[in-house]
Image: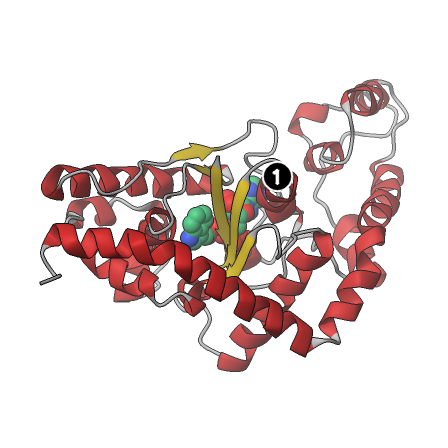
Amino acid sequence: MRILSGIQPSGSLHLGNYFAMMKRMIEYQKNHELFCFVVNYHALTSVFDAEKLRSQTFEALCDFLALGIDPEKSYFYVQSDIPEVTELTWLLSNVTPMGLLERAHSYKDKKDKGIAPNHGLFAYPVLMAADILLYGAERVPVGKDQKQHLEMTRDIAIKFNQTYGETFIVPEPEIPGNVALVPGIDGQKMSKSYGNTIDIFSSRKELKKRAMSIVTDATPINEPKDPDKCNLFAIYSLFLDKEGKAELRDRYLKPGLKYSDVKKELINVIWDYFEPYREKREKLLNDRDYVYDVMKMGAEKTRAVAKPYLEKARENVGLNY
Ligand code: ADP
Ligand code: TRP
C-alpha cells in the first residue's frame, strides 16, 4: 500500500507529532511504500523568518532520520523540492468551492483569534490535497486535528474526477483512537503553536521543566485520583503497554499517589525512550552535507513518481496540446 504523511517545520517536534504520526510512519516503512516529507510550503503560512524556517526544516529532517526513516527504502523529501505540487494546487483550486475552504477549522480558528488571514492560509487545504493526490497515496496517517483536511482532500479528488474523468486515487485517512489527540502540559491539544509541548529531543533540563509543569488537579494526596481526567496519566500512557497502564491506573485509584512522583518517573521514561536516537541525531545535526545529499536524492526519486500523475491531470483538464 502507498502511505503518505507530512509534518510542518513550524517548531520542534513533540510527543503528539511522534505518537500520532512519526512512530507509525517509521513502522509502516517495513511493509509498505512510504512517502514522508517536511511541509515547508505550508509552514510559510505561520513562519515569517527565513533563517528560522531553514533551521527548523533541517532539524525536522534530522529528527526523522535519527528516529529511523530510511531514505533509501522510502520516499523522504522536502515539500518545496517538488515544484509539481504547486502546479497541481492550481489545477485543484478550480474545482474547490470557496464554501468548502470557508468551513475549514484551521482558517476559522485563526480568523476568530483575530489573525488577519492571508490567501496562503485560506488555500492551505488545497495545497495539502495536492500533496496527497500528486503521488496516488492510498492511506494517510494523521492525528485527529487533520480529519477535516483529509475529508476536504477526498471531496476535491472526487469533484475533480467527476469533472474531468478518473484522474486521482481518493485517499483514506488513518486516525488511531488511542493517540488521536495527545494533550499538552496545559491540557489543550499539544501543539507547536500553543507553547505547551514536550519535545522529543529537548535538553534534560527543559524536559524536566516541562514535565514538572504538567497541569494536574488539586485532589489531596490521601484521596484516590481520576486517571481518565488527568493529562499526566494520558501523557505517561503513551509509553506504557496494557499491563503498565493498568498498574498506573491502580496507583491512581489508591490513596497516597503524589503527582510530583509520577512526573519525576515520567521524565526518566521519556529520556530513556529517546536515548537510542540522541547520538545519531547529534551526528546528523553536524553533517549538513550528508543530510542535504539525502534530500536531493529523495527529491529526484519523488519527482519521478509525481510527474506522470501531474501529466495525467494536465492532459485531462486540457492543458496539453
Ligand atoms: P502542530 O499542531 O504541533 O503544529 P502539525 O500540525 O505539524 O503539529 O502536525 C503533524 C502531525 O502530528 C499531524 O498528523 C497531526 O495530526 C499530528 N499531531 C500534532 N499534534 C498532535 C496532538 N496533540 N495529538 C495528536 N496528533 C497530533
Ligand atoms: N496539515 C498537516 C499538519 O498540519 C501537514 C500536512 C501537509 C500533511 N500536507 C500533508 C499531512 C499531506 C498529511 C498529508 O499536520
Q: Is residue 188 among what the camera can see?
A: no
* Badge 1 element: helix
Nearest the camera: 137 or 115?
137
Query: Going 55% across and 29% down the picture, which residue do you hit?
Result: 176
> Where residue 1 sits in the image (x, y, percent)?
48, 34
Looking at the rendered structure, the kind of residue marked 1 is Arg
Residue receiving disc 1 = 24
The image quarter in which residue 283 lies? bottom right
Judging depth in this view, the residue of 306 and 11 nearest the camera is 306
Task: Using residue 128 as the reference point, say whether residue 270 is left or right of it.
Answer: right
Direction from residue 266 to residue 78 in the image, left or right: left
Q: Is mark 1 within 8 Å of ligand 1?
A: no
Colouring method of the image = secondary structure
Instruction: Relative to 159, say whether 56 is above or below.
Output: below
Q: Nearer the viewer, residue 149 or 25?
A: 25
CA neighbours of label 1 inside 10 A, class few (<14), some (14 to 19), many (20+)? some
Above or below, 278 relative to 188: below
Residue 277 at what x, y percent from top left?
A: 79, 55
